[in-house]
Structures are given as C-alpha cells and as structure tokens.
Amino acid sequence: MSNENMNNGDKIFAMLSEILQQDFEIDAEDITRSANLYEDLDLDSIDAVDLVVKLREQTGKKIEPNDFKQVRTVQDVIDAVEKLMTADA
C-alpha cells in the first residue's frame, strides 16, 4: 500500500503518535484515537502548548492555540490538523 492510499487522518495519527512517544514519553499502546489528552495521556496545559509547537514544526502550518481550546482527544487533534491542512490546499 503506497502513501497515496493512506488517508490524511492516518498520516496525522502516525505523526502525532510519534510526537507523543518521543517528546512526551507516552507509551504507544496508550495512544488511541479516543484517548483523552488530559485524563488518559496525562498532558497538562503546558504540554498542550508544546504539542501545538511540535505540530506546527511538523506541518509547517500556523496553528492558533485558540483552535486547540476545544481539543480533548487524540482524534480531536487529528481533526483540527486535518482541517488546517485542507484549508490551505
């Protein structure tokens, strides 16, 4: 299966999973699309800001912290990033 067949959500999930594992030392098996960033993955508001910075570096897109105020789960992050990626396309 080539990368073209992989949907953006899967690519974003893979990128996000890698960031969470490398930068926040979260176990891969804990990272699911339904995982709550704050309750399940134990991130705090400072971690959330760091995550936005990392996502900005990875995507090259300017991510407004306000866009992430409503984000609670891994899937919410994927949706927000996907919306950013398609907004400029």
Image (cartoon, helix red, strand yellow):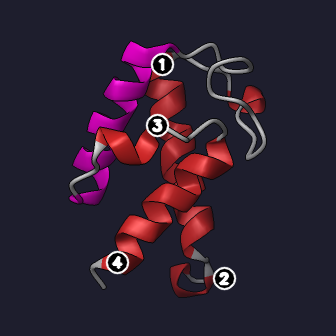
What's the residue at 48%, 19% (across, down)?
Answer: 24
Q: Decide: marks 2, 3 in contact (CB < 8 A)?
A: no
Circle 3 residue: 69
Marks 3 and 4, the one that precedes in the sequence = 3
Q: Which secondary structure, mark 1?
A: helix
Residue range corresponding to the magenta coloring: 44-61
Q: What crowding class fits label 4: few (fewer than 14 Cα within 10 Å), some (14-19), or many (20 or more)?
A: few
Distance between the alpha carbons at the discs numbered 3 and 4: 19 Å
43 w.r.t. 18: above or below: above
Q: Amino acid at mark 3?
A: Lys
Distance between the alpha carbons at the discs numbered 1 and 4: 28 Å
Indicate which label's residue lies in the foreground, 1 or 4: 4
Q: Amino acid at mark 1?
A: Phe
Residue 60 is covered by the magenta coloring: yes
- On screen, residue 51 versus residue 36, left or right, reads left
Q: Which secondary structure, mark 4?
A: helix
Marks 2 and 4, the one that precedes in the sequence = 2
Circle 4 residue: 87
Q: Decide: marks 2, 4 in contact (CB < 8 A)?
A: no
